[in-house]
Image (cartoon, grey):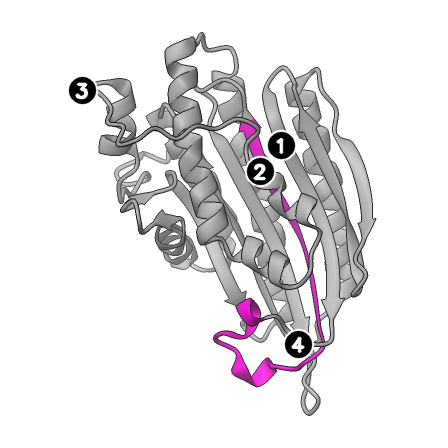
Amino acid sequence: MSQQPDSQAVKAYLLGLQDRICQRLEALDGQASFIEDSWERPEGGGGISRVISEGKVFEKGGVNFSHVMGDTMPPSATAHRPHLAGAPWQAMGVSLVMHPENPYVPTSHANVRFFIATPEKGEPVYWFGGGYDLTPYYGFDEDCVHWHRTARNACEPFGDDVYSRFKHWCDEYFYLKHRQEPRGVGGLFFDDHNTGDFDRDFAFMQSVGDSYIEAYEPIVKRRMDHAWGERERDFQLYRRGRYVEFNLVYDRGTLFGLQSGGRTESILMSLPPMVRWDYSRQPEPGSEEARLTDYFLTDRNWLEGIDEQ
């Protein structure tokens, strides 16, 4: 068992993960390429932002790496860690959001991150966080099952209850309280992850990070050529408004980035390029648009009763 955190090993993994995901997504799009933008943070650290836009598949997407540091932990990170207030810290991670143009291809989000703080008196304190979630506009059962099966498989080597716990956490976290509805069909979410065994905790974060593209790529391939028109596009833009609301009101990563003096362009990379809000809009009962909220955006166990043979 290793208890000493190795931040350099984590950083090397994250940079490699960014490269691998971007390569797979570029190949999937087949037209557009990621534009890279390296940046430095005056307070310490920096990152690499990669953005793709106006592609055959992806209207906009970003895969960001950041490694930032400071002398005092920001409020969003010390709210339930008061003993670390005033401690020097480092945070690094890969965060991505993909917004396809085709309304039948869901939006996806993923993030894996590592924090380490060093109190004046005491040993370094580390934790991992991350996960991924799927936001369809027109849902398909097989997509949801594949997404959650891949997530469960990533968690299985680390305990029988890991998937169920972090799936439930994801459902609770990606929930718009003011709308009383989930943002999507969930996936995984974990934070403050430290079992005392750094190697095992790091391996779990890698398993989650590596499984994202395996979860998302087959779904995109199945839906990217699905015919769509103005009705579907209009509904997609309307539902994207929920995504914006969550990221600006609730998302911890957005709040942490803004409070820690992060690079605004990279932090707000997750916002879609086009969106609309309609006053008191209600889908027609029985329509595919109504089915999104009536069937897909519910507290559902997508793997219940699924034959794994």
Spatial CA distance of label 4 from label 3 is 55 Å
Residue that extends furthest to the bottom in the rendered view of this protein:
121
Task: Judge depth for marks 4 and 1 and give the one in front.
Answer: 1
- C-alpha separation, residue under disc 4 versus residue under disc 2: 32 Å
- Measure the C-alpha gap from mark 2 to mark 1: 6 Å
Mark 2 lies on residue: 97
Q: Which badge, 4 or 3, comes first in the chain's sequence?
A: 4
Label 1 belongs to which residue? 61
Question: Which portion, as a residue range, is magenta?
Answer: 75-99
Labelled pair 2, 1 in contact (Cβ < 8 Å): yes
Is residue 243 visible from the viewing direction of this image? yes
Within 10 angstroms of label 4, few (less than 14), some, or many (20 or more) residues? some
Residue at mark 3: 286
Which comes before the other along the chain, label 4 or label 1? 4
Marks 4 and 3 close (CB-CB < 8 Å): no
Residue 161, percent from left and from top: 38, 59
Side (left or right) of 29 relative to 135: right
SS of the residue under disc 2: strand
Q: Amino acid at mark 1?
A: Gly
Q: Residue at x 27, y 19 (%)?
A: 288
> Which residue is identified by label 4?
3
Which label sits on residue 277?
none
Is the residue 183 above or below the residue 105 in the image? Answer: below
